[in-house]
Amino acid sequence: MAEGIYVGRLLVATPLLEDPNFRRSVVLVLEHDEGGGSLGVVLNRPSEISVTQVLPSWDALVTGPSVLFEGGPVQTDSALALAAVQSGGEPLGWRRLQSGRSAAYRLGTVDLDAPPEILAGEISQMRIFAGYAGWTAGQLRGEVEEGAWYVVDSEPEDTFHSDPTTLWRSVLRRQQGELSFVATYPDDPELN
C-alpha cells in the first residue's frame, strides 16, 4: 500500500492512529519524494479563525466554511491555499497540483502574495490552511507500513467537502471491501 503514495492521493488515519494532530484526519498529499520526504494538508480540521481575520483580501474567494483550516502541526504560523480552477490554462498566481477526474476540474496551490483580483475570475473553489503535515524521507512509508494510514484515491470534492467534520467517514465509506466498514468504527471503542 505504501508504494501507492503520490501527489493527489489521500492519507486517511486508521483508528489506531491516536496522535491528536492526526486522529481521524484526512490528508491530501501535495508533495512526495521517497528520498526527500512528503508534505500534505489535513482537509478536515476547520478552525475557529475566520479568513477575514487573517487574510481579508482572500475571504470572498474562499469556499465555505470561510475559516482557516488546520493544515497540520508544521509551520502553523504560515498559510497555504488550495484552489480549483475551471479554465484550461494555468492562471497567474496558481500552480497545478493534479488533474481531477474531470478535464474541467483542476486543483493547485495559490500564491497568497499575489493580488486576489488576478485569480477572482479563475477560481471556482478555494480553502486556506494554517500549517501543513510533513514527513522526512522514509517516515511516511514507515507509518503506512505500521498501519497508521490508509492510502486511497481522492475525489475532486474531498478538498472542498461541504461538511469537513464528516470527511473521514465519507472517504472510508466509499472504499471497496472491508475498508468501508472502518467508517463505522466508534469514536471511543470502550463505550461500544
Image (tube, helix red, strand yellow):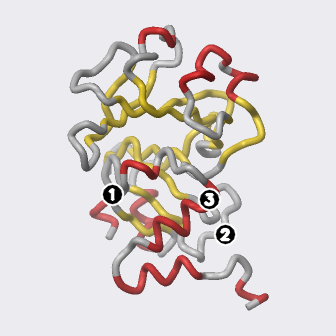
Residue type pointed to by label 1: Ile
Task: Identify which residue, 41 or 103, lies in the foreground.
Answer: 103
Residue type pointed to by label 2: Glu
Please, is residue 86 above or below residue 8 in the view? above
Q: Residue at x 67, y 63 (%)?
A: 19
Can you see residue 143? no
Q: Quadrant of residue 191?
A: bottom right
Please give the residue where the numbered disc 3 appears in the rendered image: 22
* Residue at disc 2, secondary structure: loop
The quadrant of the image that shows the N terminus is bottom left
Please give the residue where the numbered disc 2 appears in the rendered image: 18
- Lower position in the chain sequence, tag 1 or tag 2: 1
Picture coordinates of residue 27, whole percent (x, y): 50, 53
The quadrant of the image that shows the C terminus is bottom right
Q: Quadrant of residue 132?
A: top right
Please, is residue 91 above or below residue 184 in the view? above
Q: Are marks 3 and 1 in contact (CB under 8 Å)?
A: no
Please, is residue 112 above or below residue 134 in the view? above
Q: Which mark is residue 48?
A: none
Q: Which mark is residue 5?
A: 1
